[in-house]
Image (spheres, rainbow, N blue to C red):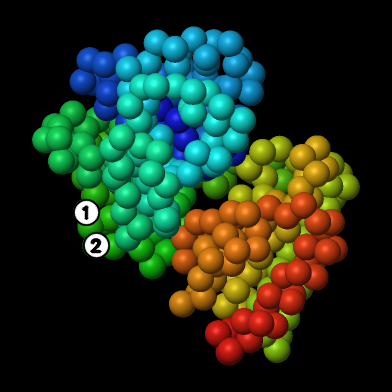
Amino acid sequence: MVIVPHVNPDGDAIGSSLGLYHYLIQKGHSATIVVPNDYPAFLKWLPGTSEVLNFEFDSALVQNVFDNADLVFTLDFNALHRCGNLISVLEANTAPKIMIDHHQHPEAYAAYTCSDTDMGSTAEMIYHFMAQLGDLELLNKDIGTALYTGIMTDTASFRFPKTTATTHRVVAHLIEVGIAHSEIHSLVYDANRFERIQLVGIALSNLRVLKPFNAAYITLSQDELDACNYQKGDTEGLVNYGLSVKGVKLAAIFIENSADEIIKISLRSKGAIDVNQIAREHFNGGGHVNAAGGKSDLSLAATVDLFKALVVNLNSDLE
């Protein structure tokens, strides 16, 4: 079996994948996680990460794994383009696919689709997947640590609206099987490099608030990233600083990526402002109502100008 998360895997993508991996191993199956590209160092302490294959680094080995797969799980994404350059391998592979995901508007590529947009994380869905199969007695510390990491990161430490009473009951069970929840939080959030802290300072100095429209945005140029020795994951969560400003209901961060000739975009909102729709219609992306991402082929300045124009059109929704 092969487990595939989305490109640029985050805490939920890696956490749900490792949780499912450890569960399948407990069941006596052979399983391999294949990531489309690298993921942040603050996730590489998780149990099982040494067994993860990176398509970017070893495409031949990954191809061999897919050639011998009898089942493919795709986790935390619901459109094949979200697996980056791995899409050609996935499209050519004939093994049945199982999608487990919580994003909106799933594509019909999987033989079996488990899609629940009311869930706050795919990691929580893996817990319920185990429950539906009657296998919660197999829940152990390794599975729990992975799932807790995914739930914690995708709910912004249990702050997002889709954090439910059921979510907390799931987490309570994970604590009961022995996870070190305080240590997990510290390993993910409190192991910052000095250069990353410097980058946060630059991001905050670039924060702009569009006061008449209750919106805010942050920009980071390639030069600014290079000056702080940028590493994957360093910009995680920075968009939330804009949303934390009093009165702001819509926030964005625009990050220049010269190698790919794109501007990476993260969007956050409060209330009924649908950033998933904004990302899909204008930035070739998607996500959730209050959290989404995308990209732009325009320059950094032109992308910001487009965002400002969109904010003006949303004026009545942002009041």
Question: Which residue lies at the image location 23% right of the left edge and 57% below the top edge?
Answer: 166
Question: Which residue lies at the image location 72% right of the left edge and 70% below the top edge?
Answer: 307
Q: Which residue is mark 1?
A: 169
Q: Which residue is mark 2?
A: 165
**Going by the image, does 317 lie left or right of 151?**
right
In the image, is residue 112 above or below residue 311?
Answer: above
Q: In the displayed orientation, state which residue is furthest to the left.
A: 134
Residue 34 spot, x, y in % from top left: 49, 24
**Dots 1 and 2: beta carbons under 8 Å?**
yes
Q: Quadrant of residue 243?
A: bottom right
Residue 24 spot, x, y in % from top left: 27, 23
Residue 73 spot, x, y in % from top left: 36, 31
In the image, is residue 249 above or below residue 75?
Answer: below
Q: Which quadrant: the C terminus? A: bottom right
Question: Which residue lies at the image location 42% right of the left edge and 55% below the top edge?
Answer: 105
Q: Which quadrant: the N terminus? A: top left
Real-space Cα distance between discs 1 and 2?
6 Å
Give amino acid for label 1: Arg
